[in-house]
Amino acid sequence: MSSTCDTATRLQEWPDPMNVAARRFQTKDDCPLCHSNDLGDHLMLDGIRVAHCNACDFMFSRETMQAVAIDQFYIDGYHDQRHMDGQRVNATININVLRRFCPQLSGRSLLDVGSGYGFLLDKARDCASIAGVELSRAQYDYSTKTLGLKTYRSLEDLAAEDRFDIITLFEVIEHIPEPREFVLRICEHLKPGGSLIIGTDNFASNVVKVLGGQFPKWIPHEHVSFFTGTTLTGMLERLGPLKLAGVRSFTPWELQARRLMFSATAGRKGGKTYSYETERNVDEAAGYRFFPLRIAINRIWFALASGSNLNGEMMYIHTIKR
């Protein structure tokens, strides 16, 4: 296994925008959730170690950018057509999740953290008020100028007294190196009795077990916190302000297809071995595979395939502030 020095050298060779991040490269020596230093190596992905905490079972990228580099990476990035199309598809599912956990939106205020281009907020205009938080300059500009949405550039731009009835975090927490502290900061802007809804990948799901290191959501330069249902609910329940109110999960049909192909071909097809260069090229591509099909059927698939459990690959957890 490569040493930390070798890993740092490898990251230094990565092209923009990661070359900036590499100069601010750091190694984590303890678990972000429980602070134990009893760590094992779960995977090595193109020079980045995914660690497993033997004390609490949390998994995380040991090699990460420092905070200033993370901010710059997201401010300058996420401006391609692929991300826009992907967010359009995800919004059709996320609005269904939101309405299942919070059937009555009328009269309630909603803050979407990591709101992207604003497609979820655009579908939730029946709320009394809607607002987003988005680092990406391109996505912020689209949400404010094209959709006319109130959007903040960071949590720090919120006034200390700003409080919301509902706060959503869809596919955000996996990007956060210190997720426990991040959720506590968000709770400061949640009203007592308000709902916090978190959606992220479930790294204990069957599709992850089958694909192993070839699961396509292992993207350790961006996804740095890898939760299971147990580690995420455990973290949330240990936070004083929150109590668990409901769960839901499903496995997207695209990942079901990968799992079946991987099993049928003894691992020759269906998996995806991570490399930074491949991810960079995909992000720069103009298209989003199967976009018309996904926009047409993904919300229907969610309605048919989701259940009130944490067995699926995408999991959603609803908590209420005490």
Image (spheres, helix red, strand yellow):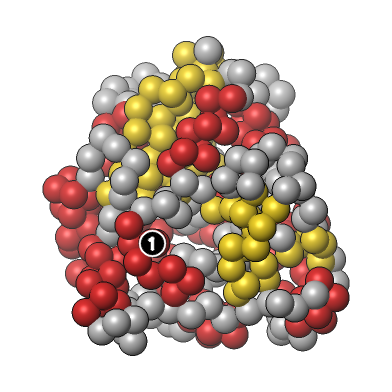
Q: Which residue is at 65% across, 29% downward?
A: 184
* Image height of 192 relative to 319, above or below: above
The answer to whether 147 appears left or right of 132 in the picture is left
* Observer-nearest of 238 and 296: 238
* Image height of 132 relative to 10, above or below: above
| Label 1: how many Cα within 10 Å (few below 14, some 14–19, many 20+) | few
* Image height of 285 relative to 121, above or below: below
Q: Is residue 75 visible?
A: no
* Image height of 246 relative to 212, above or below: above
Q: Quadrant of the N terminus?
A: bottom right
The answer to whether 7 appears left or right of 40 in the picture is right
Q: Which residue is at 48% across, 80% downward?
A: 273
Q: Position of residue 16 (x, y in %)?
A: 71, 80
* Observer-nearest of 5 and 135: 5
Q: Which residue is at 28% across, 55% downward?
A: 251
Q: Position of residue 284 (x, y in %)?
A: 52, 81
The answer to whether 17 appears left or right of 193 in the picture is right
The quadrant holding residue 47 is bottom right
Tell me the kind of residue under disc 1: Lys
Q: Is residue 203 visible?
A: yes
Q: Secondary structure at mark 1?
A: helix
The quadrant holding residue 45 is bottom right
* Observer-nearest of 188 and 8: 8
Identify the residue under disc 1: 209
Q: Position of residue 34 (x, y in %)?
A: 69, 37
Q: Position of residue 287 (x, y in %)?
A: 38, 80
